[in-house]
Image: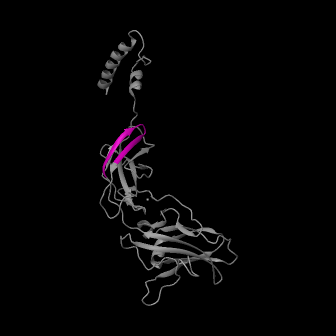
């Protein structure tokens, strides 16, 4: 198994892969990158920007008047010749499968720079669109450093347009602890794409399961497994818990079915005994204190059960 939409009445947090920095000669989506590829997800394709970072090779501080030109193509950068490591800069001629276009440009000031660019523009400049849920769309993004009409440096990267989302997790269950809920679930094995990670959400509700007015949803961390702890909750408050699966590109599933739980302090054996007046200090002891303490404890536990 391999990381922003609205669902129900609760906003889903933006879920992304670990943030990265561009290596020399590389351009990446700094918040959505894994194993050699950046990802463009459905929310980005719907109008959000991708956060590009690039680091030009050779790593020489740009001269005054240099510019960065950002290109998108359906064809990978050259691997040999005078244009090695540079993407195509123009659409191919008749009968060519190459489609490439200038996305935007900016003044070059540093070797490593960042720029937010509308994702749908990048995809369109490579001759594609954001309407299909196919995960096979690959866009090559290149930044070319120019001094006048002369190419002086490059950065390149592979961007996968991933619009599909996993199916929702099933079998959500909730265990309680002090100011926390322990949530577990089963990952779906069907769906258009597999889950990369999961996030659980707990929303304060009343006895009928209706969210409390002004309630704040608390989210878990992102996990790759099938259990997580949601902490920072209020003891005694009932919560509705749902879990969403996310694709590696950050597309969320619909929420799972709700499960409910109320955090509660958990007392261990000794806490129950001492809070009820027990005085035995533990160990085997000598004389009759130990056995009598156990008898007293039995009565204490029975009293606690009656009280609860």
* Picture quarter with the N terminus: bottom left
Q: Which residues are magenta?
A: 170-184
Q: Is residue 61 above or below residue 13?
A: below
Residue 305: x %, y % from top left: 30, 25
Residue 289: x %, y % from top left: 39, 12
Residue 308: x %, y % from top left: 31, 28
Give the residue drawn at x 37%, y 15%.
293
Give the residue drawn at x 56%, y 69%.
26
| Residue 54 lies in quadrant | bottom right
| Residue 70 lies in quadrant | bottom right
Give the residue drawn at x 45%, y 75%.
123
Q: Nearer the viewer, residue 200 or 94?
A: 94
In the image, farthest residue toward the top: 287
In the image, farthest residue toward the right: 64
Residue 288: x %, y % from top left: 38, 10
In the image, farthest residue toward the bottom: 94
In reply to whether residue 248 is colored magenta, the answer given is no
Q: Nearer the viewer, residue 170 or 207?
A: 170
- Per the picture, the main secondary structure of the magenta-coloured stretch is strand
Give the residue drawn at x 47%, y 66%.
37
Question: In the figure, is residue 55 to the left or right of 270?
Answer: right
């Amino acid at each position: 198994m391999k990381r922003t939409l609205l669902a129900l009445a609760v906003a889903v947090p933006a879920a992304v892969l670990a943030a990265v920095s561009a290596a020399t000669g590389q351009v990446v989506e700094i918040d959505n990158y894994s194993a050699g590829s950046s990802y463009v997800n459905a929310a980005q394709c719907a109008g959000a920007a991708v956060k590009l970072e690039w680091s030009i090779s050779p790593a020489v501080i740009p001269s005054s008047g240099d510019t960065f030109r950002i290109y998108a193509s359906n064809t990978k950068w050259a691997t040999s010749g005078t244009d090695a490591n540079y993407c195509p800069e123009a659409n191919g001629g008749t009968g060519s499968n190459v489609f490439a276009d200038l996305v935007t440009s900016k003044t070059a000031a540093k070797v490593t720079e960042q720029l937010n660019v509308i994702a749908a523009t990048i995809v369109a400049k490579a001759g594609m669109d954001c309407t299909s849920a196919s995960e096979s769309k690959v866009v090559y993004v290149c930044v070319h450093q120019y001094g006048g009409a002369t190419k002086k440096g490059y950065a390149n990267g592979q961007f996968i347009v991933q619009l599909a989302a996993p199916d929702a997790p099933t079998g959500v269950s909730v265990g309680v602890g002090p100011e926390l809920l322990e949530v577990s679930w089963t990952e779906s094995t069907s769906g258009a794409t597999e889950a990369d990670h999961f996030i659980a959400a707990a929303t304060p509700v009343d006895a009928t399961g209706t969210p409390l007015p002004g309630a704040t949803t608390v989210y878990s961390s992102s996990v790759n497994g099938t259990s997580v702890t949601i902490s920072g909750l209020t003891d005694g408050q009932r919560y509705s818990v749902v879990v969403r699966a996310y694709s590696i590109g950050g597309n969320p599933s619909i929420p799972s079915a709700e499960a409910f739980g109320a955090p509660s302090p958990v007392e261990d054996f000794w806490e129950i005994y001492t809070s009820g007046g027990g005085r035995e200090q533990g160990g085997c002891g000598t004389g009759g204190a130990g056995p009598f303490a156990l008898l007293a404890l039995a009565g204490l536990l029975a009293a606690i059960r009656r009280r609860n």
